């Protein structure tokens, strides 16, 4: 009997041992990280990013796959480079990756992450996002500013013609595009433009916006190696604090102007003029139950400036670049406008929906030159399993939409600029088609898509409808690193007036 008990005990022990091995192996497979390069001490894989990280990560993805794990400094990071994987992260596991990582830009410029784009996922973000989508960036309100877009695009056309000496000289088209988007955004949130002498701190308005945008895309050592953050080795924190001070003074001026006008006149009446976005936020702040502070308003203004100016102007410049490199494509777009609009007047925003090929040109530009090539990084709230791999909590996620737009497995002739690939297609840029995600997708997708696309469509349409263009030298496509990746070299072009209506004044 005793020997039988011993045999049973041994048998049970063996069963538990094998069960333990099975469970360990099963759990271990759940903890398998995605493939990636072996990290170096302290810096991890930071040295592999190079001067153009989106391109370097595209090359690494060809070796390690469309889901890749890197340790950037001490920060666990996953890089996704295919539409199927992007869909897993931004749709299937959208809630898990709805957070934003802490960063110096959010802390020192964006009022300690009080804006919408960089704020952590939670109740505050939901309230601010609702403010944007329900009040500020609705289709109706964006459409109410159509006259602003049309007026400012006309001003841009006139300034290009004047600066060129009526077609005698080459002009840097990027400067005119930056002024265009700056003026549109300022008129939308404040009903007027601002000159350099209205800012304090030694920077002009355009310089302030450029500095904020450059710092948003800057590589900050402290974001990846927190133990070195206090040293501010690159001086980035000092620059951020300096430009934040200039912006904060400007934003206070904007709000004070609106408050004073409301005290004197009782506020804007709908029949007198379209309410700008600061007016809308102040109306809501005065509504019982609303908790919109001055910091909230300033953070929204900051999001509007950084998201609405550089991304739109850079996209139009890339569209012009590709059209000038592909004269047959440019001619086809011009002929479509001649057929739909004629040469006796300029294109209006109401004409754009009839210009199918033009909108294909814009989609193709977004495919090859997305405004944010790796989107704004996400962060996992908890651990999860995706594609047979385990992604730990607090992992930073980069979605390399630049790589996805050039994937030969997804796009035929992926490196060629072929807008006709979208003719007759329902594929769109609004976050439902995961092979074309210039504005992201899911909860953290960009809420300003309609505003951005409307500016790009109209500006590009008028540039190629009003002018024929001569290029100085060969048109290159070299990129420069930033949050939005602009051309490395200026695009110098010489216009010649092509409409039968009079030249712009």
Image (tube, rainbow, N blue to C red):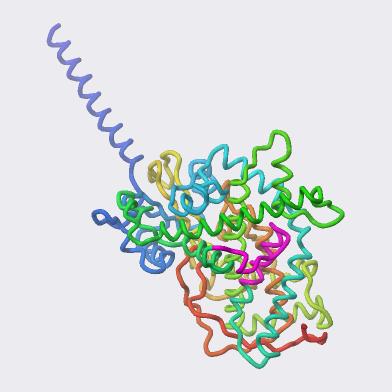
Is residue 277 left or right of 403 when viewed as pictured?
Answer: right
Residue 23 at x, y percent in the picture = 30, 31
Q: Residue at x 26, y 29 (%)?
A: 20
Between residues 4 and 81, which one lies in front from this camera angle? 81
Task: Identify the image quadrant of the C terminus.
Answer: bottom right
How many circles with numbers are drawn on the protein? Answer: 0
Q: Residue at x 53, y 44 (%)?
A: 94
In the picture as drawn, the residue positioned furthest to the bottom comes out as: 168
In the picture as drawn, the residue positioned furthest to the right comes out as: 271
Q: Is residue 432 visible?
A: no
Q: Is residue 107 above or below residue 423?
A: above
Between residues 397 and 236, which one lies in front from this camera angle? 236
Q: Is residue 329 magenta?
A: no
Q: Is residue 162 above or below residue 61?
A: below
Where does the magenta region start and end?
A: 178-200
Residue 248 at x, y percent in the picture = 56, 54
Q: Is residue 194 magenta?
A: yes
In the picture as drawn, the residue positioned furthest to the top comes out as: 1
Q: Residue at x 34, y 54 (%)?
A: 72
Between residues 353 and 209, which one lies in front from this camera angle? 209
Residue 18 at x, y percent in the picture = 24, 29
Q: Is residue 69 visible?
A: yes
Task: Identify the image quadrant of the N terminus.
Answer: top left
Is residue 85 left or right of 12 when viewed as pictured?
Answer: right
Q: Is residue 86 above or below residue 285?
A: below
Residue 374 at x, y percent in the picture = 48, 60
Q: Is residue 185 above or below residue 128?
A: below
Q: Residue at x 63, y 49 (%)?
A: 297
Question: What main secondary structure does the magenta stretch of the protein show?
Answer: helix
Between residues 207 and 11, which one lies in front from this camera angle? 207
Is residue 389 left or right of 327 when viewed as pictured?
Answer: left
């Amino acid at each position: 009997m005793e020997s039988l008990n011993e045999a049973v005990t041994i048998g049970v022990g063996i069963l538990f041992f094998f069960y333990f091995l099975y469970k360990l192996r099963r759990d271990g497979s759940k903890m398998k990280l995605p493939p990636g390069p072996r990290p170096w001490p302290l810096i991890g894989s930071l040295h592999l990013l190079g001067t153009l990280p989106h391109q370097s990560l595209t090359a690494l993805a060809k070796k390690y796959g469309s889901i890749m794990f890197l340790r950037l400094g001490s920060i666990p990071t996953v890089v996704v480079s295919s539409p199927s994987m992007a869909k897993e992260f931004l749709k299937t596991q959208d809630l898990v990756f709805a957070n934003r990582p802490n960063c110096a830009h959010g802390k020192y410029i964006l009022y300690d992450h009080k804006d919408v784009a960089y704020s952590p996922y939670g109740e505050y973000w939901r309230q601010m996002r609702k403010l944007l989508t329900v009040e500020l960036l609705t289709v109706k309100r964006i459409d109410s500013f159509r006259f602003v877009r049309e007026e400012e695009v006309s001003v841009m056309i006139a300034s290009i013609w004047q600066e060129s000496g009526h077609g005698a000289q080459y002009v840097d088209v990027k400067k005119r595009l930056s002024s265009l988007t700056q003026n549109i955004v300022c008129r939308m949130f404040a009903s007027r433009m601002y000159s350099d002498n209205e800012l304090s701190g030694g920077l002009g308005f355009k310089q302030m916006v450029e500095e904020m945008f450059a710092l948003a895309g800057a590589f900050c050592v402290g974001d990846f190696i927190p133990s070195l953050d206090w040293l501010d080795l690159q001086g980035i924190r000092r620059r951020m604090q300096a430009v934040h001070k200039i912006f904060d003074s400007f934003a206070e001026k904007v709000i004070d102007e609106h408050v004073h006008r409301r005290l004197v006149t009782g506020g804007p009446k709908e029949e007198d003029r379209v309410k700008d976005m600061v007016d809308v936020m102040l109306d809501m702040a005065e509504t019982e139950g609303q908790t919109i502070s001055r910091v909230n308003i300033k953070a929204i203004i900051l999001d509007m400036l950084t998201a609405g100016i550089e991304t739109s102007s850079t996209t139009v410049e890339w569209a012009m670049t590709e059209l000038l490199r592909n004269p047959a494509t440019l001619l086809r777009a011009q002929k479509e406008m001649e057929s739909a609009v004629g040469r006796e007047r300029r294109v209006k925003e109401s004409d754009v929906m009839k210009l199918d090929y033009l909108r294909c040109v814009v989609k193709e530009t977004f495919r090859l030159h997305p405004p944010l090539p790796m989107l704004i990084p996400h962060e996992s709230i908890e651990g999860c399993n995706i594609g047979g791999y385990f992604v730990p909590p607090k992992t930073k996620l980069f979605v390399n939409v630049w790589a996805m737009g050039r994937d030969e497995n997804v796009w035929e002739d992926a490196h060629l600029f072929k807008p006709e690939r979208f003719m007759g297609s329902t594929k769109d840029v609004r976050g439902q088609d995961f092979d074309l995600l210039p504005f992201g997708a899911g909860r953290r997708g960009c809420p300003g898509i309609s505003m951005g696309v409307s500016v790009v469509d109209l500006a590009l349409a008028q540039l190629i409808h009003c002018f024929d263009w001569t290029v100085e030298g060969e048109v290159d496509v070299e990129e420069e690193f930033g949050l939005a990746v602009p051309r490395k070299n200026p695009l110098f072009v010489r216009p010649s007036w092509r409409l039968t209506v009079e030249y712009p004044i």
